[in-house]
Amino acid sequence: MAMKKIIFLCVLCSLMLGAVPRAHAEKPVEPMGIGTWVLNAGIGSSGYGYGDGQWLYGFGIKGAIQKGLWQVGWGVISLGGEAGVAWASHNGLNYTRFNIAPRSSYHYGWDVPGLDTYAGLTTGIGFVGNSIASGTAVHFYGGMYIGGSYFLSEQFGFNAEMGLGTTMLQLGLVYRF
């Protein structure tokens, strides 16, 4: 079963990388500005804590969309939302988690063309099901994250994010419009 997941992730990454257009000579100086929309999606590792400090580890998929709204100091604050799903299993315990939440980030580009670094918070609701209990539990979902995007062109780039949430470490693509 683990081999099927690895093959699935490799194929998905290959498809995602094939969708990125070739880099242009001009890179945006300020990837996140007021009025800019950014959509990112990726796959990565996930974790689920249960009873007595036990953890299950698996993988997750998450997407987020945000719009730059306010200039604050040297950066921009954005608001948007995210949704993601995570799976994990260990010793016969399987779980699935779906989260949906608004999120806010502070973006700072460091005067490096094409670079957008950010940190933020998210809070919303999550739905968790596992192989031991029947039904789905609804819970408060909160997370924090740091991340970065590097744009290869005016619209497309790569994204990495880590923190507490649907995924703990995620790699993916970003689209700016």
Image (tube, helix red, strand yellow):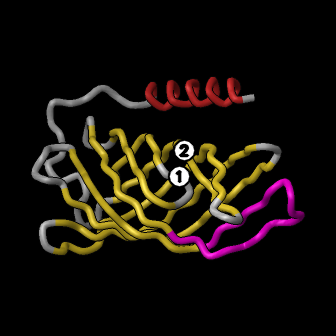
Residue 129 among magenta residues: yes
Q: SS at mark 2?
A: strand
Residue 151: quadrant of the picture: top left
Q: Residue most toward the left? A: 111
* Position of residue 21 in the picture relative to residue 87 (left or right): left
The stretch in magenta equals 125-142
Residue highlighted by disc 1: 167
Q: Quadrant of residue 25?
A: top left
Residue at left offset 49%, top offset 52%: 168
- In the image, residue 36 lies at what x, y percent? 30, 60
Mark 2 vs mark 1: which is more N-terminal? 2
Side (left or right) of 104 relative to 31:
right
The residues bearing labels 2 and 1 have C-alpha atoms spaced at a distance of 6 Å
User: What residue sits right under mark 2 in the picture?
Assistant: 45
- From the viewer's side, name the closer residue of 86 and 72: 86
Q: Position of residue 4 (x, y in %)?
A: 70, 26
Q: Secondary structure at mark 1?
A: loop
